[in-house]
């Protein structure tokens, strides 16, 4: 339990047992499932937590309640890591009312076989709820990142509860940089829905916000412009950091050698930042984050079965699925007898909008030859001239 403001408490939990968030994202520092309580003449609880932590959550809530009973459970997001204990709550507090969007109630019928008829309150854009001195206003945030999502603004305390927006990977009992894990979280989970994020950012720009309370990651109460500005950049698919990401796959080491040679040439020519990642071995979510963060992306891979090496093809599909755009893309291919990877990568990348291709491409036919080294130097000069 943590007091955030007068009558506003944090009652979330930390999960250090989880290995993959949403079944795919590595979370070495665990996850936080956040929940909040607003205590006034009436009491509102903001979202539940993951199924494995129902008892701990109720215990945390009971400590805050100190014998009182909650009046409302506000459900901002129905993803199971936040909604799994709705039914537990409603059984534990039979007089409470659940507050949510119509979309959320439809999902409750799917998960719990009930919409809690007679105990529900449907809210929409601009709906309000008074707890006494605390006045809550609901803001619809469809596809940030599920369609039923709502934000809640506490005008009295100037707190914005933002569902999964402004969240990050990592439990709250571990110190780590916000930007990195929030960026990886954003582009992996929310990134496809940039237009929707832009729309809700316009809505909240009108509010006096002194604190942001997301459903993952820390409560944000200082330097809020920094976090909001990053969300503006990310959701508009703008470049955050000028630099080159070299994402490669290599079977026998020759394509890796070419990638490292390009890295050295770029640094030698003054490129401000170069990041190299092995797509077959490194975390592809981290590679995705880097691709969206930087201005230039080099895709270097081998020809495989007449097409693109599987790890590279999978990565490009990740780019497509998350609406990769507004970047310069470069191709490096290898093929001992029939280099065809660039053709295959171009065909895939056509699904991405507003992509500029470098004039220079690099082709290896086995080992890194002198002609290929010349192409690498030519490519490095072309890219370095753009910074």
Image: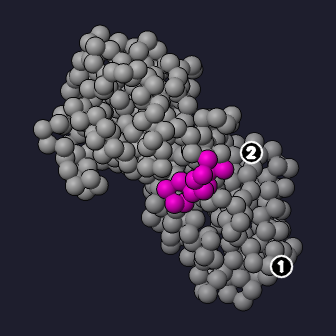
- From the viewer's perspective, is residue 310 above or below residue 120? below
Question: Where residue 120 sits in the image (x, y, percent)?
Answer: 18, 37
Residue toward you, 108 or 55: 55
Q: Earlier in the sequence, mark 1 or mark 2?
A: 2
Q: Which residue is mark 2?
A: 273
Determine the residue positioned at 26% across, 45% down: 104
- Tell me residue 91's x, y (percent): 28, 41
Residue under label 1, please give it: 367
Is any part of residue 55 visible from this angle? yes
Q: Residue at x 32, y 14 (%)?
A: 40
Name the spot of residue 355 as percent of width and height, x first: 52, 56
Which range is magenta? 16-28
**In what element is the residue under mark 2?**
loop
Viewed as shown, does residue 132 lie left or right of 168? left
Residue at 49% x, 56% y: name it: 22
> Residue 348: which numbered mark, if any?
none
């Amino acid at each position: 339990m943590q007091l955030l403001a007068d009558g506003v408490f944090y009652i979330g939990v930390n999960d250090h047992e989880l290995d993959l968030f949403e079944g795919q994202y590595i979370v070495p520092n665990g996850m936080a499932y956040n929940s909040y309580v607003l205590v006034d003449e009436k009491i509102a609880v903001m979202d539940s937590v993951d199924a494995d932590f129902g008892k701990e959550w109720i215990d945390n809530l009971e400590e805050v309640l100190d014998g009182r009973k909650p009046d409302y459970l506000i459900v901002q997001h129905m993803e199971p890591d936040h909604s799994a204990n709705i039914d537990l709550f409603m059984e534990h507090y039979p007089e409470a009312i659940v507050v949510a969007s119509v979309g959320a109630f439809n999902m409750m019928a799917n998960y719990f076989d009930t919409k809690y008829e007679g105990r529900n309150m449907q809210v929409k854009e601009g709906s309000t709820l008074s707890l006494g001195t605390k006045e809550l206003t609901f803001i619809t945030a469809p596809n940030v990142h599920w369609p039923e999502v709502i934000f809640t603004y506490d005008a009295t305390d100037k707190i914005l509860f933002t569902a999964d927006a402004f969240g990050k990977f990592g439990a709250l009992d571990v110190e780590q940089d916000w930007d990195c894990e929030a960026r990886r979280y954003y582009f992996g989970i929310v990134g496809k829905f940039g237009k929707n994020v832009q729309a809700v950012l316009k809505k909240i720009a009108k509010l006096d916000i002194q604190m942001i309370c997301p459903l993952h990651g820390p409560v944000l109460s200082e330097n809020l412009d920094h976090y909001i500005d990053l969300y503006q950049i990310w959701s508009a698919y703008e470049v955050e950091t000028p630099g080159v990401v070299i994402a490669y796959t290599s079977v026998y080491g020759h394509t890796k050698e070419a990638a490292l040679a390009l890295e050295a040439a770029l640094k030698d020519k003054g490129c401000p930042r170069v990041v190299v990642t092995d797509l077959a071995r490194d975390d592809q979510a981290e590679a995705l984050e880097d691709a969206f963060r930087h201005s230039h992306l080099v895709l270097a891979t081998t020809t495989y079965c007449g097409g693109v090496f599987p790890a590279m093809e999978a990565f490009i599909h990740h780019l497509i699925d998350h609406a990769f755009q507004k970047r310069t893309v470069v191709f490096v291919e290898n093929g001992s007898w029939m280099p065809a990877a660039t053709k295959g990568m171009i065909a895939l990348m056509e699904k991405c909008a507003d992509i500029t291709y470098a004039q220079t491409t690099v082709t290896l036919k086995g080992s890194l030859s002198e002609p290929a080294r010349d192409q690498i130097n030519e490519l490095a000069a072309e890219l370095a001239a753009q910074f």
